[in-house]
Amino acid sequence: MLELLGLGTYPAALYRTVLAHPGASVEDLVEYLHWPIERVRSALDECVRLSLIRPTWEAPGSLRPVHPDIGLQALLLRQEAEILERQKQLAEARIDVARLVDEYSGQQRDLRHSEIERLDGIEEIRDRIEELTHSCKSALMAFHPGGGQSASSRAAGRPLSEVLGDRGVVMHTVYLDSIYNDPESVDYARWLVRSGNHVRTAASLPCRLIIFDREYAIVPVDPDASASGAMVFHSAGILASLCELFDHVWEKAVPLTGGKRVRQPVDEEELTSQETAVLRLLGEGFTDEVVARKLGVSVRTGRRITADLMGRLGAKSRFQAGMRAVESGWLGEEQDAGQDREQNEEPGPELREPSV
């Protein structure tokens, strides 16, 4: 217990030995303790510094212990004084912490009650997603562009999905068709379905989007760098528009299948959903890089699809390809209706406000 008073193991043992052998010399202590003389001298110096041992004036070279009631009581009082000072410091720190918590809570309350909240960096985004996930009560809807999901995204998504499932919250998730190029992402999507959620795929997606209970929505500030920052919307008007966008994409998306989603055309006059998306994106003036990102494929793959379409249309430019696609009915109402009929062949859960 002497160690609690600030006395090291060796000085404590030496003090006990001197208590048992008053008048012992340094050589005697080496013999009693079976220590090297350097250790004895070091421990002795510590005991002298703490006023536990003093030399004997009557017998030079001999050592006498200070009575424990005096020496140890002094150490005990010193330790108690240090503890009291530490308690004072902790009490002051507790006041500072309470003040900081109150200030931060006030800031967060102001943010939570605002209609728009700014999140900077991936850590703030993940923390806010986790908060909203844990408070989600009925439905979570999400667009996941980018093709195959990274291992870190899948690892982070599983526990949150399980939390939602335990509360009976159903997820409606739309991935890109290109997810089928990544078996691990497909396995994860099938796990979501087996857990009672709904997954569909689409040729392209407008942006990354997560909607919680149709009350909160998270959208990246920059679609090309979604980890850099995001906006949280709580405005009824903005939420209504974002929910309508999700419902529109959801209705045209196709339920996750056991095989490859992208339908192969039966003849040259028919387009796959991916090819239709490419024509629409090119017609809107997007670059090859943006088209590839929206499809979740490599730029090389996107360019190959574009070149194939231009060849089938006999077009020498993208503008000409767009014109001929419209003239051929590839981008007209008839093509859209045909695709809708194809998608309706696999019925999926309807998504209506407010419950799913």
Image (tube, grey):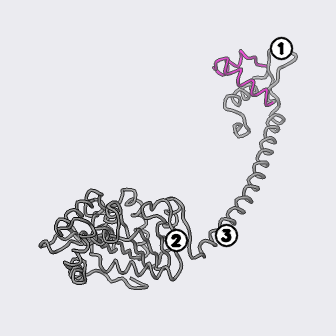
Viewport quadrant of the C terminus:
bottom left
Is residue 45 covered in magenta? yes
Q: Is residue 14 above or below residue 209?
A: above
Which amino acid is tagged 3?
A: Gly
Mark 1 or mark 2, which is nearer to you?
2
Residue at mark 2:
232
Which residue is the site of mark 3?
106
- Residue 238, position in %: x, y? 49, 79
Kind of residue at disc 1: Pro
Question: Helix or strand or loop: what does disc 1 sit on?
Answer: loop
The 10 Å Cα crowd at callout 2, few under 14, some 14 to 19, many 20 or more, is many
Q: Is residue 221 found left or right of 277 in the rendered image? A: right
The numbered disc on residue 243 is none
Most common secondary structure along the magenta stretch: helix
The three-letter code of the residue at mark 2 reads Val
Q: Is residue 214 magenta?
A: no
Compared with 145, 325 (above or below) is below
Element on which disc 3 rests: helix
Image position, residue 222 (x, y; %): 46, 64
Q: CA distance from mark 2 to mark 3?
A: 18 Å
Q: Quadrant of residue 94?
A: bottom right
**The N terminus sits in image quarter:** top right
Q: Are marks 1 and 2 in contact (CB under 8 Å)?
A: no
Magenta residues, as a range?
A: 23-50
